[in-house]
Structure formats: structure tokens, C-alpha cells
Amino acid sequence: MKNFEYYAPTKVIFGKDAQMQTGSLIQAQNCKKVLVHFGGGSAKKSGLLNKVFASLTIAGIDYVTLGGVVPNPRLSKVYEGIELCKKEKVDFILAVGGGSVIDSAKAIGYGMANDCDVWDLYDSKAQATGCLPIGVILTISAAGSEMSNSSVITKEEGGLKRGCNTDYARCKFAIMNPELTYTLPQYQTEYRDTCAQGNGNKRNENSTSAQAS
């Protein structure tokens, strides 16, 4: 038998139509304006975003949107998000998608809460002192980032990939409705379910390797 400690401060909301609780969950954080952050067109085409917007509206929470996150999330998109959040006085970030969207949201949150270039946090030139609160609606069976303190960002110039791991970026909640994963290829769901338990460790290992390279 192996002894272990398990620390998971993220609130998990699991089940059918769980995404309809989004507005009340953010309301409980006493936040007024949300950045809804997502990747490609699937969140729109599936109708998920419209349901999220409706939930926010019912809760009286204003929102702005930023899509276009790609695999191995880019620093340029993070900068775009930080600029938008400052302009719109955003006080909460909602990531709708998988690991790349969540990592990008965490980086934007860092950029809003620290008086330095956000890349310096990932390049180990500065230490994070905070992060904007973040919530997640998962659209894949397991990402890892929704429950971890880790995020990895790629700087296009030089193709540099770096990680930042602090508890400031742990998500306030993670909404998991299995129905949102039904459009994924079967192999992807099977692979993610198999690897989910070790995914957080792998992310941290990859982050450490990237910083050492």
C-alpha cells in the first residue's frame, strides 16, 4: 500500500445540464463581469455557448468573449485576453473547452493580477502573487488542468514552451457534463479516461522539462 495525500480545492459539479449552473456559481464568487474564453467553433455550433450566455444573463452577470485558442496555447492570445480584460474590467474568467483553453485562461488570470509581463512568470523571471478567479466547463472527458495548479504556454518567437505552477491558478469550479463530450471521437475519450489520473503529473513533468531545455 502506498501512502498519499490528495488536495483538490476545486469544486466539481458533475451531471446532466450542469452547465446551466454557471451563472449561479460565478455569482457565488461575487464577480460582476466574465471573460468567456474558448477555442474553435465547436462550442458555438453545439449551442453550448448560447446556454452559458443564458445562464449568465439570468444571474445578472455581464460578459465578453474571446475565442480562437489553439492546441499548445499561444502567448499572443494570452496578451490579447489580458488587454480585453483590462479594457472591460473583467473580474472572472470562464474557460469553455479542454486543457489548452484552461491553460490560456490561467495565463490571462496571471496577467491581470501581477505587475509584470506574464511571460516572466512562465520563464521563471518573476513570481506570481495572485490570479484572477477561474472557472471551467469541460468539453473533453479529462484535461488535468481543471484540477491542477499547472498551466503551459507557448511563446511563438523561438517556439518556447514554459509552465507556471501555483495554487493561485487553481480553478474555483469545474463543470463536468458527460453529454458535452459525446461529439468527440471514441478513441480520444478512451485515451483520456485511461490517462486522466496521471495527466497532472505528466503536465508538471513536461513543464519542468521545458524550463530545463
Image (cartoon, grey):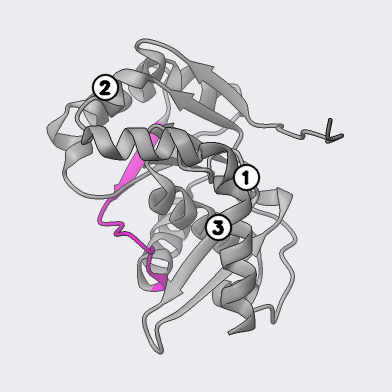
Q: Amino acid at mark 2?
A: Lys
Closer to us: 82 or 48:
48
The extreme right residue here reads 3
- Find disc 3 in the rendering and name its residue: 151
Query: Contact (CB < 8 A) between labels 1 and 3?
Result: no
Q: Position of residue 53 (x, y in %)?
A: 29, 27
Mark number displayed over residue 148: 1
Q: Earlier in the sequence, mark 3 or mark 2?
A: 2
Given this view, does label 2 or label 1 mark the residue nearer the observer? 1
Position of the N terminus, as image quadrant, is top right
- Find disc 2 in the rendering and name its residue: 51
* Label 3: element kind: strand
Q: Is residue 66 magenta?
A: yes
Mark number displayed over residue 103: none
Residue in the image at 58% along x and 85% along y? 213
Residue in the image at 52% along x and 63% along y? 152
Q: Position of residue 178 (x, y in %)?
A: 36, 20
Q: What residue range appears in magenta?
A: 62-75
Q: In this rendering, does residue 150 appear at all?
A: no
Spatial CA distance of label 3 from label 2 is 27 Å
Residue in the image at 38% along x and 40% along y? 191
Q: Position of residue 59 (x, y in %)?
A: 43, 18
Q: Is residue 13 above or below residue 1?
A: above
Spatial CA distance of label 2 from label 1 is 26 Å
Q: Position of residue 35 (x, y in %)?
A: 40, 45
Residue in the image at 33% along x and 34% along y? 189
Mark 2 crowd level (few <14, some 14–19, many ≥20, 10 Å Cα):
some
* Label 1: element kind: loop
Given this view, does label 3 or label 2 mark the residue nearer the observer? 3
Q: Is residue 116 above or below residue 168?
A: below
Q: Quadrant of residue 28?
A: top right
